[in-house]
């Protein structure tokens, strides 16, 4: 009935006699679809409801002034949106169940209804129809003709499909098209091709694809490097092994999974020279990070991986650029330049203490406040560890007037309150100034930018803070380099209170 309600009179307008029937039918269908217990029936009812609602909308517009047809437009839009959502959900369920033919039929229904099919549905359909090459190639032809707009997920699905069919050349051409389109190369797009080449023993081709796509932005994991090394060992391409091991060492800072370690051991132990001799002697050893003797098997001394000079300069420049964008007044940039000038005059400072982070640690209780004693205790503890620290303190916590000096209290229990400083706290502030161990940053809420910037101005300069810094660093560094910076320059701490409230023990965790 719903498919026939759209009949029209000779004037081209919907038949007025059908309007009461259509409205009643629409209401009953919508209520039935909303309360029906059968999900499959609801999804099949949705397209008819959408067509009927469009008919009612057109009829309402034709019969009433524009000012009176708004309600009909809103109702039709609501029904149509719900129908589209249900149909798209039906396509995704077919795709996830690997029912490619039914998914393709559902997509065709959406196209016939004039609904805009999003790209992610086509991508899901490509993956679901890998066992139907003709269907996928038809979609690809439409895509290259400009009727569909591919994204990186589309290219990833196409590469996976061609690899599944054993069409390595076509998979490589898809990557070329992706590069020509100016799209960023991702690991998920390239990895199926590299893994297939490794499995087929085409080690040289796999290495070429890895090197080329890495230049275009793909970031590979330890498992990918292990597959490459295993393929090279199996076919005797020993010239690639040491460079791959070096990249594995430099790029994969995290602890390697046991499966990756086992594959590396097996591959290296099976490698043979052209004369048939064993190429590598493989053994697992336990290395003490504090020991300078190195590996007991080969004698190599392990070195801590840090940001190199070029990486530090690049991140520092990007940080300055972001500071200019965020703070139009220039106060933040002036604070960054100020800490730079101070450290250039006093290069012996090899540690920066995040003053507010230390002062507010463990202060979220009634009566908690900015604790100058904790900061001073931390400064002395770091000195005893053999470092020369400098404090970074926002100027709002460093009053210049000692009469009725007050500072803000930003603990959770006392937000937006003020604390009056004691004589002892004022003496601590003056002590820091006399020693020249504090940098007063003229910033509000952005003092963390100052110590971040300070850590980049010199190799190995430590930072004492429990701030995880994810919000800032992920805009400046990729996760691998951020982890490298954190493990080589970040000092974490903990205050442990004894039974005597005045007794405080500080534990600092230096990088290995």
Image (cartoon, helix red, strand yellow):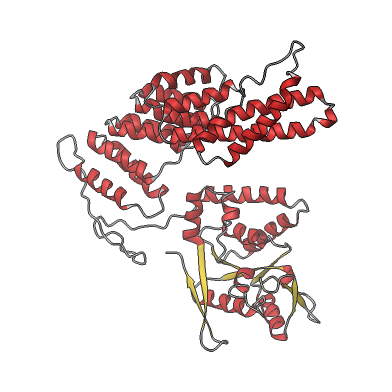
Q: Is residue 208 above or below residue 136?
A: below
Query: Visible in this render: residue 391?
Result: no
Counting every numbered tag in the picture gives 0
In the picture, the quarter occupied by the C terminus is: bottom left
In the picture, the quarter occupied by the N terminus is: top right
In the displayed structure, does residue 326 sit left or right of residue 476? right
Residue at the farthest top position: 10
Q: Is residue 394 above or below residue 29?
A: below
Which of the 4 image quarters holds residue 285?
Answer: bottom left
- Asked whether 8 or 247 is in front, the reply is 8
Q: Position of residue 444 (x, y in %)?
A: 72, 62
Q: Is residue 255 above or below residue 76?
A: below
- Asked whether 446 or 197 is in front, the reply is 197
- Asked whether 170 or 13 is in front, the reply is 13
Residue shown at 71% from the left, 48% from the top = 325
Q: Position of residue 476 (x, y in %)?
A: 58, 49
Q: Position of residue 498 (x, y in %)?
A: 51, 85
Q: Position of residue 53 (x, y in %)?
A: 68, 29
In the displayed structure, does residue 203 sit left or right of residue 424? left
Query: Visible in this render: residue 225?
Result: yes
Which of the 4 image quarters holds residue 163?
Answer: top left
Residue at the farthest bottom position: 500
Residue shown at 43% from the left, 55% from the top = 305
Residue shown at 19% from the left, 37% from the top = 273
Residue shown at 68% from the left, 35% from the top = 78
């Amino acid at each position: 009935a719903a498919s026939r309600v759209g009949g029209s009179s000779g004037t081209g307008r919907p038949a007025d006699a059908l309007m009461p029937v259509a409205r009643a039918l629409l209401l009953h269908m919508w209520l039935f679809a909303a309360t029906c217990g059968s999900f499959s029936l609801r999804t099949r009812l949705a397209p008819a409801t959408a067509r009927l609602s469009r008919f009612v909308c057109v009829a309402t517009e034709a019969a009433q002034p524009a000012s009176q047809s708004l309600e009909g437009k809103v109702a039709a839009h609501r029904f149509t949106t719900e129908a589209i959502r249900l149909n798209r959900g039906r396509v995704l369920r077919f795709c996830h169940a690997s029912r490619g033919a039914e998914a393709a039929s559902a997509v065709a229904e959406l196209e016939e209804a004039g609904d805009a099919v999003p790209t992610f549905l086509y991508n899901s359909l490509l993956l679901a129809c890998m066992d139907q090459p003709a269907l996928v190639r038809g979609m690809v032809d439409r895509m290259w003709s400009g009727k569909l707009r591919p994204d990186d997920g589309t290219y990833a699905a196409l590469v996976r499909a061609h690899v599944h069919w054993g069409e390595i050349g076509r998979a490589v051409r898809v990557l070329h098209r992706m590069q020509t389109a100016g799209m960023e190369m991702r690991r998920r797009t390239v990895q199926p091709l590299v893994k297939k080449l490794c499995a087929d023993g085409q080690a040289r081709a796999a290495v070429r694809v890895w090197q080329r796509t890495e230049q275009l932005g793909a970031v590979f994991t330890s498992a990918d490097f292990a597959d490459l090394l295993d393929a090279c060992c199996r076919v005797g391409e020993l010239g690639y092994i040491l460079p791959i091991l070096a990249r594995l060492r430099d790029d994969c800072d995290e602890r390697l999974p046991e499966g990756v370690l086992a594959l590396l051991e097996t591959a290296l132990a099976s490698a043979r020279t052209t004369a048939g001799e064993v190429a590598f002697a493989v053994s697992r050893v336990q290395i003490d990070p504090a020991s300078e003797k190195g590996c007991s098997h080969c004698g190599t001394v392990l070195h801590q991986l840090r940001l190199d000079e070029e990486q530090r300069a690049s991140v520092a420049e990007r940080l300055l650029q972001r500071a200019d964008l965020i703070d139009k007044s220039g106060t933040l940039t002036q604070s960054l330049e100020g800490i730079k000038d101070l450290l250039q005059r006093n290069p012996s400072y090899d540690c920066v203490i995040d003053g507010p982070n230390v002062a507010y640690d463990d202060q979220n209780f009634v009566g908690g406040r900015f604790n100058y004693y904790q900061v001073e205790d931390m400064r002395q503890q770091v000195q005893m560890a053999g470092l020369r620290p400098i404090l970074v303190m926002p100027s709002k916590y460093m009053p210049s007037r000692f009469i009725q000096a007050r500072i803000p209290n930003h603990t959770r229990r006392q937000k937006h309150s003020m604390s009056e400083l004691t004589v002892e706290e004022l003496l601590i502030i003056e002590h820091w100034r006399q020693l020249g161990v504090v940098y007063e940053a003229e910033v509000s809420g952005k003092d963390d930018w100052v110590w971040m910037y300070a850590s980049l101005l010199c190799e190995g300069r430590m930072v004492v803070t429990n701030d995880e810094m994810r919000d800032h660093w992920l805009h400046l560094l990729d996760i691998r380099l951020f982890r490298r910076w954190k493990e080589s320059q970040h000092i974490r701490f903990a205050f442990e209170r004894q039974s005597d409230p005045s007794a405080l023990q500080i534990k600092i965790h230096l990088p290995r």
